[in-house]
Image (tube, rainbow, N blue to C red):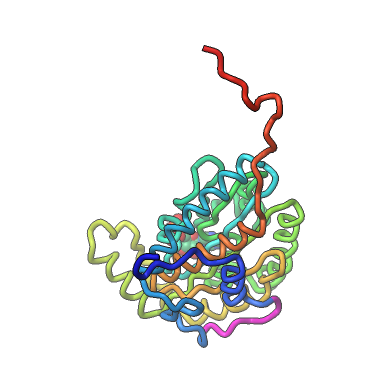
Amino acid sequence: MGKGHRPAPSTEELAAFAESRRVLPGRRPDLGAVDPAGTPGYDGNKASAKRELKQLRDELFTFQTTMWAERKHSMLIVLQAMDAGGKDGTIRKVFSAFSLQGARVTGFGVPTEEELAHDFLWRIHPHAPGHGRVAIFNRSHYEDVLVVRVANLAPESVWRPRYDLINDWEHSLAAAGTTVLKFMLHVSRDEQRKRLQKRIDEPEKQWKFSAGDLDVRTQWDDYMDAYADALGNCSTDEAPWYLIPADHKWYRNLAVARIVASAARRMDPQLPALEPDLVGTKVPA
Ligand code: ADP
C-alpha cells in the first residue's frame, strides 16, 4: 500500500459515518452547537479526502448506471443551505459522478404566479424521480417552511401545517421505492461573508451575487431557527436529514459522497439477468 493510501471505507464504516450525521427523528438539532468548520467522523486530511472522494465517485457512477439498467429503484437527493453554502459546488464535485442518462438536477427559485396559485407541492412533484432515476433538488419544497416563514410570505397558519404535509409526501415517495436523502450544508456566517465577498470581487463569480443575499444574511438567526425546526420536524426514518458542516469544501464533498454511497450500498441495485439465449451469440457480419 502506497504512502498515505487508505482503502475504500467498509460498508460498516460508511453506515456509521452516515448515522453520525443523521438528524434523529423528532430531535430539533442545536445548530449553534455544530461547528461548521468541524470535520466530525473524519481523521484524514484534505488530500486523503480528495482521494477517497475519487473512489466514491466511481462507486456512485456504477451504482447509478446499474440502477438505471434495473429500473426498479429511485433516489431523491435534497440540498438546502444558506446562500453560498455550497449547493452548486456539491453538485459539481460530487454528483457530476452520475451519468446524465437517468440523473437530473432541478433548481427551485421564486415560484411563478401559476405555481403560487396551487398547493406548494404542485411544482415539486413532477420532478420526483421515476424508476431508475436520481433526482437532485437544488433548493426544494423546504423553502416553503424556510424563506416563506422567515420573510413572512405566508402566515403561520399556512406554513406550520406544511411540516406534516411534507412528511406525508415524502412518505408516499418512499412507499413507491424512492430513497430520500436530505442534506443541510451548514456554513458559518463568517464563511458566507468570505464567499459572498469573493462573488462581488471576482468578475467571473459576480453573476452569482444578488443584493437580496445581503438582506437574507441579516436574518441569519431566524433562518437557523427555521432550519432547526425543518430538520427536527421532518427527519424521518424514511427520509432522513443529514447535517453537514460545510465550511471546508473537501469535508462537505466527502461527507455527502459517503452518505449517498452508504445508501447506494443498501439499495444494492442489480443488472438485469443475462438472457440465456444471448450468451455466446455472435453478431452477424
Ligand atoms: P440560487 O440562489 O439557489 O442560485 P435562484 O437565484 O434561482 O437560485 O433562486 C433562489 C431564490 O428563490 C432564493 O432566494 C429562494 O429563497 C427563493 N425561493 C425558492 N423557493 C421559494 C419559495 N417556495 N417561495 C419563495 N421564494 C423561494
Which residues, given as a range, are shown in magenta? 25-31
Q: Is residue 110 visible?
A: no
Q: Nearer the viewer, residue 251 or 13?
A: 13
Magenta span contains residue 26 = yes
| Residue ID at (69%, 69%) | 163
- Give the image location of residue 150, x and y in percent: 54, 74
Magenta-drawn stretch, dominant element (helix, strand or loop) = loop
| Residue ID at (56%, 80%) | 225
- Give the image location of residue 65, x and y in percent: 56, 44
Q: Is residue 270 left or right of residue 85?
A: right
| Residue ID at (34%, 62%) | 209
Q: Nearer the viewer, residue 64 or 199?
A: 64
Question: As displayed, is residue 130 above or below residue 22?
Answer: above
| Residue ID at (44%, 81%) | 38
Question: As displayed, is residue 53 above or below residue 112?
Answer: below
Q: Nearer the viewer, residue 166 or 217?
A: 166
Q: Quadrant of residue 44?
A: bottom left
Q: Quadrant of residue 204?
A: bottom left
